[in-house]
Every structure is written in C-alpha cells, then in structure tokens.
Amino acid sequence: LYTDGINEAMSPRREEYGMERLRAAVINGPSDADHVVDRVVADVRRFVRGADQSDDQTIVAFSLSRDLALPAMDQTLKS
C-alpha cells in the first residue's frame, strides 16, 4: 500500500518517479515486507536527490505467516 506521493515524487528536473520505477523497485529483490519497503524508500530517495516534495510519502507492506493463517486460508495456500 502506498500514497500517491511515492509514484508522484519529483526529481530536481521535475520528472515523476512513476509507476514503472515503483514496480521495478518492488519486484527486483527479496519479497519480504521489510526489504520491499527499504528498497522502495531508498530508490525514491535516490531519485529525488533531496528535491522538495509537495505531497506526503507513505508506504506500508505486510506479509502473512502460515502459522497465523486461518484454517480456510491454510487450505487455499496448500492448493
């Protein structure tokens, strides 16, 4: 989950970060929640290079542990 401040982040040259960069940051590396968030935040920071932003930037990732899955979900996960 993310706010539009992530994909609409602006570089010093007024270029938007965009969905393609966001998608690449999400899929290019380990898929656990901590790594995804760290990777996206680092990539956005590199892209904006300290340029002032006009919108909030929020990203939330979560994962589901098999140990916490409901019995009905457990059956779905095994399929």
Image: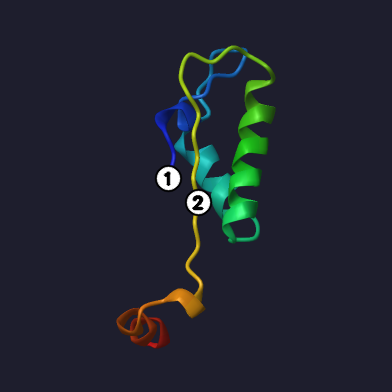
Among the 4 quarters of the image, the one containing residue 78? bottom left
Q: Position of residue 54 (x, y in %)?
A: 48, 13
Q: Position of residue 65 (x, y in %)?
A: 51, 72
- Distance of label 2 from label 1 (alpha carbons): 6 Å
Label 2: which secondary element: loop
Amino acid on which disc 2 is placed: Ala
Instruction: Examine the rendered structure and indicate whether residue 3 appears above or below residue 14.
Output: below
Looking at marks 2 and 1 on the same chain, the residue that comes earlier in the sequence is marked by 1
Instruction: Examine the rendered structure and indicate whether residue 32 appears above or below residue 77.
Output: above
Residue named by callout 2: 61
Residue named by callout 1: 1
Residue at position x 66%, y 28% in the image: 45
Residue at position x 65%, y 53% in the image: 35
Q: Are marks 2 and 1 in contact (CB under 8 Å)?
A: yes
Instruction: Examine the rendered structure and indicate whether residue 40 appears above or below residue 50.
Output: below
Judged left or right of residue 77, residue 12 is right
**Quarter placement of the C terminus:** bottom left
Label 1: which secondary element: loop
